[in-house]
Image: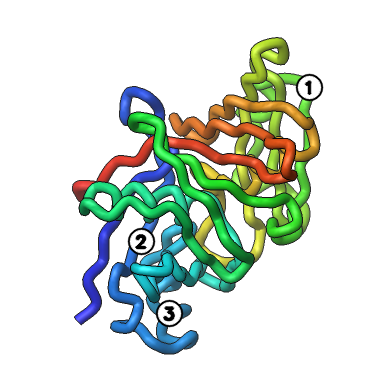
Amino acid sequence: MTELEVLRVFCGPDGAGGNLLGVVRDGASVPGAAGRAALAAELGFSETVFLDDAHRGTVDIHTPSVRLPFAGHPLVGLAWLLRSLGQPPRTLRPAAGEVAVRFEEDVVWVHGRAEWVTARTTRRYASVAEVDALPAPPPGEGWLYAWAWQDEAAGVVRARAFPRRGDAVVEDEATGAAALLLTHELGRPLDIRQGTGSRILTRPYPDGTIAIGGRVRPDRR
């Protein structure tokens, strides 16, 4: 039997928001790509992550319709879960490469690279109100990260994310990879307020990596 943990990743400081994540700690219980794809589609979360080797931190990430080489919210969520079990990882290994992990009190940080992010478009809007008024999804094709400055001097961004890939995920509540890409494009740390109440923190580093940070809570439904 497959045991599943469900988390909310990138919660606000008050515990609100957060993107649902399915975690299969025993990846061997779902050994094949077809079975993993079917489980991710059945769950319908933005992503489901399979832990294949707890010692090495080897993971496999699936959306309801595609396998991803890298994604932020599954790695942040899994790192938080392993720490809560007394096994805090220093490194996780999705298909894209080695991901360094750090913990700062209740914020979990993972490091990624812009070239690991699958094709998506960031689009700046003139105001927070314009972003909030967008339908879900907006007309058009392809992955869209819609954003506007909420406080440019402070690096605070309002964002919404629309995968537009034809599966059940119409809008992503919180998206680490898109936040990483936007940080790469703007070249500065960001404090992103996304979805209905989620918060994503980012920091670029001189080695070309970008850290994505956030808070995690277990989902009690």
Residue 46 position within the rendered picture, expressed as x and y whole percent measured from the top left:
48, 57
Q: Residue beneath label 1, please?
A: 126
Nearest the camera: 170 or 19?
Answer: 19
* Quarter of the view holding residue 70: bottom right
Q: How far apart are the alpha carbons under marks 3 and 2?
A: 11 Å
Query: How many numbered discs?
Result: 3
Residue 159 tag number? none
- SS category of the residue bearing label 2: strand
Residue picked out by circle 3: 36
Disc number lying in front (1 or 2): 2
The mark closer to the camera, 1 or 3, is 3
Q: Is residue 60 above or below residue 118?
A: below
At a point 49% along the width and 31% down the height, the residue shown is: 199
Residue sitting at x 35%, y 41%: 216
Q: Is residue 67 above or below residue 23?
A: below
Task: Read off the residue under disc 2.
Answer: 22
Sequence order check, earlier mark of 1 and 3:
3
Q: CA distance from mark 1 to mark 3?
A: 40 Å
Task: Please tell me how crowded label 3 is: few (under 14), some (14-19), or many (20+) other residues with Cα within 10 Å.
Answer: many
Secondary structure beneath dot 3 equals: helix
Pointer 3 or 2: first along the chain: 2
- From the viewer's perspective, tell me whether residue 185 is left or right of residue 67: right
Identify the residue shown where x is 78% and y is 22%. Answer: 126
Task: Measuring from the top left, give residue 96's x and y in whole percent.
Answer: 63, 66
Q: Position of residue 106 (x, y in %)?
A: 34, 32
